[in-house]
Image: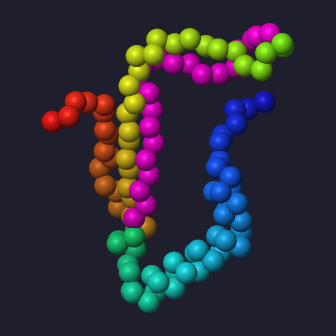
Amino acid sequence: MKPSESLKAARAAGTTEAELRVFWDLLDTQIKAKSVGTTRIYNFDETSIVEGEFRAGRVLGSSLTKKSTVVDGGTGEWVTILECISAAGSRLTPCVIYTGSRL
């Protein structure tokens, strides 16, 4: 057994090999037509984590219920991490965003 990961239905439907080929062919055509170099093509990713101690996993529970509840402290705050790298391999410094007050 392993944990599942959610994938939205619309995203899954558009993730066929044919749809991906159309996208990448169009992108390749535009990159060549505009003479865009690899130093000007970037990939940007974002992930979020919760601060504090939390252990997700499997628990032993009654077979009469579908879920078992685990209580945590509820004090963790979200932290967002942004990273960016170019097609040529150069990286920007990662950005870490903490929960804070309005300035």
Residue 48 lies, in percent from the top left, at 44, 37
Q: Is residue 12 above or below residue 72?
A: below
User: Magenta span covers which residues?
Assistant: 42-62
Residue 71 lies, in percent from the top left, at 56, 11
Q: Quadrant of residue 22?
A: bottom right
Q: Is residue 29 above or below residue 54?
A: below
Report the front residue among 6 and 36: 6
Residue at image x 38%, y 55%? 84
Quadrant position of the C terminus in the picture? top left
Report the front residue among 97 and 83: 97
Residue 37 lies, in percent from the top left, at 38, 78
Report the front residue among 10 and 32: 10
Residue 9 is left or right of residue 71, and the answer is: right
Residue at image x 65%, y 57%? 10
Farthest residue to the left: give it: 103
Residue at image x 71%, y 69%? 17
